[in-house]
Image (cartoon, rainbow, N blue to C red):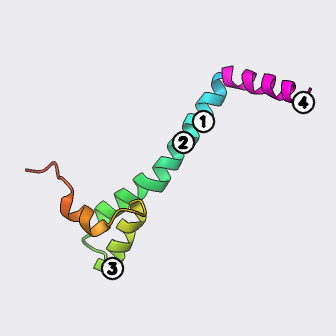
């Protein structure tokens, strides 16, 4: 009986647009504050910060399996 009630409640939550909006806002905030803010800080501060701190900032941005020194050599820039 409890599982039927739980299934019915989850089904009704899935159909409500507010749940989808809040889930989207929540996901956006995770991406924004975890990655985009750090990327902006790194891009604007990398010339003024010591090299070891800049390496630490970049290594925190990238996934654990990616070597940040390789990423710096291989990245493409939009500038000609």
Q: Which residue is mark 4?
A: 2
Q: Is there a contact, CB below 8 Å, between mark 1 and mark 2?
A: yes
Tell me how far mark 1 sits from mark 4, CA to CA.
25 Å
Q: Residue furthest left?
A: 80
Q: Earlier in the sequence, mark 2 or mark 3?
A: 2
Q: Earlier in the sequence, mark 1 or mark 4?
A: 4
Tell me how far mark 1 sits from mark 2, CA to CA.
6 Å
Residue 35 seen in the figure: yes
Q: Nearer the viewer, residue 63 or 25?
A: 63
Q: Which residue is mark 1?
A: 23
User: Residue at image x 79%, y 26%?
Assistant: 7
User: Residue at image x 38%, y 73%?
Assistant: 56
Q: Give neighbour class at mark 3: few <14, some 14-19, many 20+ (Cα, 10 Å).
A: few
User: Residue at image x 31%, y 75%?
Assistant: 49
Q: Which residue is mark 2?
A: 27
Tell me how far mark 4 sits from mark 2, CA to CA.
30 Å
**Is 13 one of the magenta-colored residues?**
yes
Which element is circle 2 on?
helix
Q: Give neighbour class at mark 2: few <14, some 14-19, many 20+ (Cα, 10 Å).
A: few
Q: Quadrant of residue 24?
A: top right
Total marks shown come to: 4
Q: Is residue 28 above or below residue 51?
A: above
Q: Give neighbour class at mark 1: few <14, some 14-19, many 20+ (Cα, 10 Å).
A: few
Tell me how far mark 2 sits from mark 3, CA to CA.
31 Å
Which element is circle 3 on?
helix
Mark linked to residue 52: 3
């Amino acid at each position: 009986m409890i599982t039927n009630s739980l299934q019915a409640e989850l089904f009704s939550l899935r159909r409500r647009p507010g749940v989808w909006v809040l889930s989207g806002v929540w996901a956006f905030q995770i991406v924004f504050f975890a990655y985009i803010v750090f990327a902006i800080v790194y891009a604007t501060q990398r010339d003024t910060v010591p090299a070891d701190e800049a390496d630490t900032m970049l290594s925190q941005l990238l996934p654990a399996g990616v070597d940040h020194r390789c990423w710096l050599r291989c990245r493409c820039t939009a500038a000609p």
